[in-house]
Amino acid sequence: MAKKISGPSYGLLEPGDLSVTSRRRFLQGGGAGLLMGFVWLRNGKAWAAGEEPSLKVIGGGDNNGGNTFQGFQPGGFIRIAGDGKITFIIPNTEMGQGIYTGESMLIAEELEVGLDQITVIPAPPNEQLYQQPILKSQATGGSTSIRGAWIPLRQAGAAARTMLVAAAAARWGVPAGECTAERAVVKHGPTGRTLGYGELVDDASKQTVPADIVLKDPKDFKLVGKPAKRIDTPSKVNGSALYGIDVRLPGMKIAAVEVCPVVDGKLKDVDTRPARAVPGVVDVVKLDNAVAVIGDHFWAARQGLAALDINWDNGSKENVSTQRIVEDLKTASEVGKPVMGRTVGDVAAGFRNAAKTVEAVYQLPFLAHATMEPINTTVHVRPDACEIWVGTQAPTAVQKAAADLTGLPVEKVIVNNYMIGGGFGRRLIADSIVQAVNIAKQVSYPVKVIWTREQDIKHDLFRPAYYDHIKAGLGADGMPTVFTDRVTGGSVLGSYLPKGLPEGVLDTDAIEGAAETPYDFPATQVDWVRKDPPIKVNWWRGVGPTHNVFVVESFIDEMAQAAGKDPVEYRRALLGKNPRALAVLNLAAEKAGWGEKLPDRTGRGISLHDSFGSYLAVVLETSVSPAGEVKLRRITAAVDCGININPNSVKAQVEGGFVFGLSAALYNGITLANGQVEQNNFNDYRQIRINEIPPFEVHIVASGENPGGLGESGTVSAAPSLGNAIFAATGVRLRTLPFDREELRQKGSDGSVLSMVAPVGLAVAGLASSDGAKTSSDPARPDLSLSSEMV
Amino acid sequence: MISLKINGQSHDVDVPGDMPLLWVLRDVVGLTGTKFGCGIAQCGACTVHIDGKPVRSCVMNVSAVGDRPITTVEAVGETPAGKKVQEAWLDLEVVQCGYCQSGQVMSATALLTRNPRPSDADIDAAMAGNICRCGTYPRIRAAIKKAAEV
């Protein structure tokens, strides 16, 4: 029996989980007119069953919770002033994914205004108004924003438009049905009379909230589905966009900070005088595990810090090393007690009936986020309040952390959220905000804490390392009889939840992308051995699927190879029950010229997955020199993300996400020795550069399905398509990330290696002996120490 | 006191001579469009023009600038090449998080100023010093080509 995965997950959104807004939650406000709250219900099913959500008072107010706004504010998202100014209070954080534009399009579509007519401001912390219905928290992550906002934001726009139209109709004494709205103007068709939204705010505020909100038929969309210019672009090309790091306040000072280089080490003591002697240094502040030097500018603070000879108490983790962590993962995989993730069909019979078994071990490293904007937070702790200026993916978590540290009530913690120079999961965690508040508590003025790039990389909270043992049985026809995957690694959810995750409880993130693949296997078992590393871990772009889809999609190619079949043909045969996945696979293969002849030492690799509610297939063409140098030649993607809001952003996210994943696949891995992170900056935590990026095509499959998430899909596809392309070019299967060019040189330097030519499968099968895959007809090689029996 | 000519205006700043130009611009003059990314001239986010040439301001001592004119992203749109670059960036929707884009715009403008018809290899040579973690490289390349056609 299939075991339904439950618990917190970033997985597919089920229709029943789609949120709706309450149809009638309003509060008779005084003076300023009617203030209503459209609350994103936690559970659409409760609403469908007729349960009334609890009536809660929602402040109309300004962005910081006051009640100063005069005008029409139907709920938390829309504010229309008497002068006609329209403001969208955007629930999600803009960190490059284009959400300011995408969510504005949803509201504007139904409100009947142009994107050029609106001003967008980030929402203040307020779980009641802005809780994300999938994450169950006011947070931006997991490619959930559009999925969560698709219905509520359109409903908010439609309700407001309905009330504005009704107000105009009442003033004219005509039926509302004779009136239409366009570009913030209501028009009475028969007489041609018009009223602007600004002229209607008082009357609209007195209108009853519509009981049944009717949304547009998609065929009538004016904005949704058409390429829109991003609303944040102009400010980002002329330097006027403000990120958290750009905050400047009267009296503000700037801090540089040095944290104990050993994991979990503490500050023993420091003579602060050398720093204080540096011109421009204002203060030196000691923390439990760090020293901060505060100056008139960052340079003075840096120089002050450099002048210090800090004594650290390295604590108990001086011997932490990635070598040991990887050994521990391997041992845990072999002897640890797994938590069942998903089991379908008769796994034992699947192996008994197999004509051949294939198995392999894949290993993935710790990863830093390395957002372009280094970590920073500005804080002013005053006697009666704490004000924070920061770009965060989780504003309520920031607010709560600061309240806990200062002893202030949460409403006295003001969080000003900014655009983020790259999130990728890093800014879901408030660790750096906690540090900044602890510094600011010791001074009277606003202080901006900036981490150097070295601090940013060394003291990141990393994507966990994994050790995955994957195995399949193949029938006489080469097709799978069973598919199993044992994932071993730490729990991100356990690191994230304040109370942790109890042992024995499944962290669905650990197996997401492996437990449920696009493919139809007769039997499946995916389980997880929890082995938390001695360092903190965190979400990283693509979360579970980035890790698991690399393993699964690489291994599907290994299965195809063992079966002597072409990788695309092999996948097609497993997609009978998944037409959307099949469609993107076929489109990507066709557009990439799959099967067409390529030069020697050149190959195409494909990857396919359905993650976050979207389907993505990518074909990557690459060549590999005898020296092991990988050169990317062409990238072709096909995506089905359901109804796509802004095709510009859809393509941008596929392109950018994939490039992000390429950096990790080719270059990135965080290692520790003697309890310290060994990487420092972009010189040794290298990022892919423009000269390495080939032509990139993205093809969108038209769809009427609910929108899927897309901020992370491209990242998921990168490593598997590259690994498969490298195999196709060289016959060398690389199973450890980042891909080791030296291994590639040693194993694949034979210039006579066949290139991938049609029919691809035959060429691949002919290369089997050059590879380390363990199959029944290819006995285990000594460099692969797999447990011999898994089932 | 050091005198700087930034975007056509004179600024007298009381800072140490070894202070990188980046921090003078951001923390003293208040021009925050120029970004801090790495501090070691690896990422290009801090690129400005000195005498029209691209310079990594994070490793440029302020005392070494002398009386040469400095142009930052806030004013680069006033140059013919800078205007074309910014327009192309808007036309092709290059930007995502945008944090690196000040530096990208400055590097691209410097390229087009000295080479109005750059080849792919020219673009690689001029732009490979600018990292974009959002992966906007395909659009950066396309936008430079578009700007070159204007």
Image (cartoon, coloured by chain):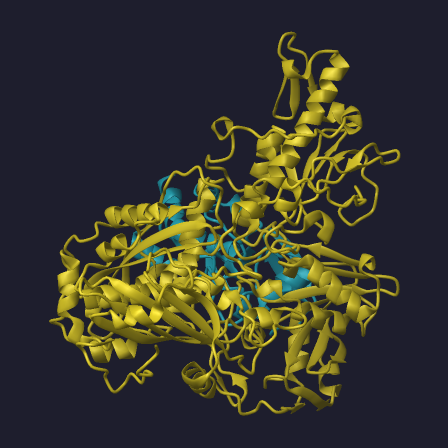
Question: Chain B is which colour?
Answer: cyan
What is the x, y in percent for residue A785? 31, 85
Work out whether A155 lies above or below A271.
above
Residue at (66% x, 85% y) in the render: A307
Work out whether A177 lies above or below A142.
above
Work out whether A39 lies above or below A527.
above
What is the x, y in percent for residue A626? 19, 73
Question: Chain A is which colour?
Answer: yellow
User: Quarter of the image containing the C terminus of chain A?
Assistant: bottom left
| Image position of B69 (left or right of A286) | left
Picture quadrant where residue A317 is located: bottom right
| Image position of A209 (left or right of B122) | right
Name the one closer to the observer, A600 or A536. Answer: A536
Quick one: which residue is furthest to the top in this view? A191
Residue at (63% x, 35% y) in the render: A155
What is the x, y in percent for residue A78? 69, 37
Q: Is residue A82 visible?
A: yes
Name the one closer to the observer, A139 or B25. Answer: A139
What is the x, y in percent for residue A192? 64, 10
Name the one closer to the observer, A260 or A454. Answer: A260
| Image position of A642 (left or right of A538) | left
| Image position of B96 (left or right of A345) | right
Query: Total marks drawn?
Result: 0
Picture quadrant where residue A201 is located: top right
Quick one: which residue is furthest to the left in this view? A752
Picture quadrant where residue A284 is located: bottom right
Residue at (80% x, 27% y) in the render: A206
Q: Is residue B113 visible?
A: no
User: Quarter of the image containing the N terminus of chain A?
Assistant: bottom left
